[in-house]
Each structure stands twice: as C-alpha cells, then as structure tokens.
Image: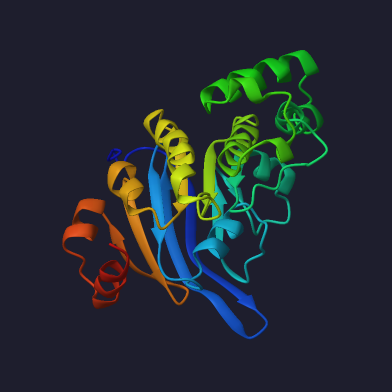
Amino acid sequence: MGKSMNAKIMVEARDVHKFYGDFEALCGVSMDIHEGEVVVICGPSGSGKSTFLRCINGLERIQGGDIVVDGLSVTDPNTNMTELRSEVGMVFQQFNLYPHMTALQNITIAPIKVRGSNRPEAEKVAHDLLGKVGIPEKADSFPSELSGGQQQRVAIARALAMNPKVMLFDEATSALDPEIIHEVLNVMLDLARDGMTMAVVTHEMGFAKEVASQVVFMDEGLIVEAGDPNVFFSNPKEERSKQFLEKIL
C-alpha cells in the first residue's frame, strides 16, 4: 500500500505542542500525511494519539507549532474552521449519532446544512453510502435499533457524506464487541483500497499490517518511531516500541 512520496501532502504537522494546564500532551509532534496514504498511529493509553487527531481538525487548539490541512492552517486566525472541519471526516470511539434521527437523516443533515445540498441529492448520496458500508436496508432505522457495528458504519457514512479529503478514525472499533469489529474494519479496508487519505488510531495491528503505508508509534506525547509497517512489526528500532509490540502482538 506504499504511496509515492511525491504525492501531495494533505496533513502537515510541524513541532506541535498541546498543553492541558501544566500537562504537556503533545511535546513537539511532526508528521506528514500524503494524499492516498493510510497512517496508523499506535501506542499506549495517554500517549497523545487521540489528542493529535483532534488537533488536526481543530477540535483541540494547539499551543505551539502548526498543522496545515490541504493548505489551511489550524493556527491561522483567518482560517474558516467550519470549512476545514468539512474537509476532514472524523469517526470517534463512541458513535455520536443523533438518537432522534434515522440513519438516513443522520447522514444527510450536514450536507444539507453545511454544504447546502438539496435533500433529494443528499438522500441519494446517503443511500449510496449505506450500500458502501454494507447496510443499505437500515436507512429508516434509528440508532437504538442498530447494533454497535451498524451504528459505527452509519457514523462512517455520515463522515463520508461530506466528501472529505482526509478521514480520521479515533479507536473506531474499541467500543465494539470483538465479533463485530470486522464489520467496521472491512469498511475501513475498502476505503483504504479506494485511495482515501486516512489517519487511524487503533490497536488493531492486523489492520495496520494489511493497509498502513506508515506506522507511527507514540509514547508520552512524542513520536518514538515511524516508518514502514513491515520494518516496524518485524524489526522495530526502539526499545520502547519492542516492549509495546511484545504486549499486544
């Protein structure tokens, strides 16, 4: 799945620092994500992985450095953050669906309200996306009528409905029962194979081995090691990476 490095840089993070009070959650993180690349970010709890994803789409403000998403800087006061967020789809651990809306309504609300799509057009796209994530028959179901895996697939369809340039997945399978994790991972695999630019925080190392173009290992707010997945899994350079892999593989 390696992408040529002359592909356009979609996300450029430079020396990113993020504080919560006195606690430094990100201690100078730098990373490029190229168009069509799948970057898997792994590491122990509290290493800053999820915080970093949330900084990419401006859900968290950074205190140092910069992140530029397809030419838009998260630190530039002139950047329209609504526009930036509409370019970056995000799928969370919790599905965050509107409980009083059907799957179809959950998927169409942002394209209609933010993008100004007309309803028939937005609904056609939503039906297509429900087919893409494997639940075309669930358009009129409410979240409470869906399994966790189905809800998460609606959440992915909702993010895709904005036609984002980059998709961020923050432990998208960790709240799911083990036997339905594959439902969501298969959708993510398909997206990766279709060339979607993705940054994925996950403990699913099989997914990383299969589709990652780059694996980034974080600990204590720093990138400890980054590189080709084959090298990372078979012969990690850093002692800290080795310890982590011994625990999870």
Asked which quadrant contains residue 7, the reply is: top left
Asked which quadrant contains residue 244, the reply is: bottom left
In x, y percent, where is residue 233? 22, 58
Asked which quadrant contains residue 88, the reply is: top right
Q: Residue sitting at 55 percent across and 57 percent down?
A: 53
Nearer to me, 208 or 56: 208
- Do we see residue 203 in this rendering? yes
In x, y percent, where is residue 127? 64, 19
Q: Residue sitting at 27 percent across and 57 percent down?
A: 227
Q: How many marks?
A: 0
* Image vertical order of residue 62 relative to residue 37, above or below: below
- Do we see residue 80 in this rendering? no
The residue positioned farthest toward the left in the image shown: 235
Is residue 26 found left or right of 195 in the rendered image? right
Nearer to me, 122 or 104: 104
The residue positioned farthest toward the bottom in the image shown: 22
In x, y percent, where is residue 35? 42, 38
The quadrant of the picture occupied by the C terminus is bottom left
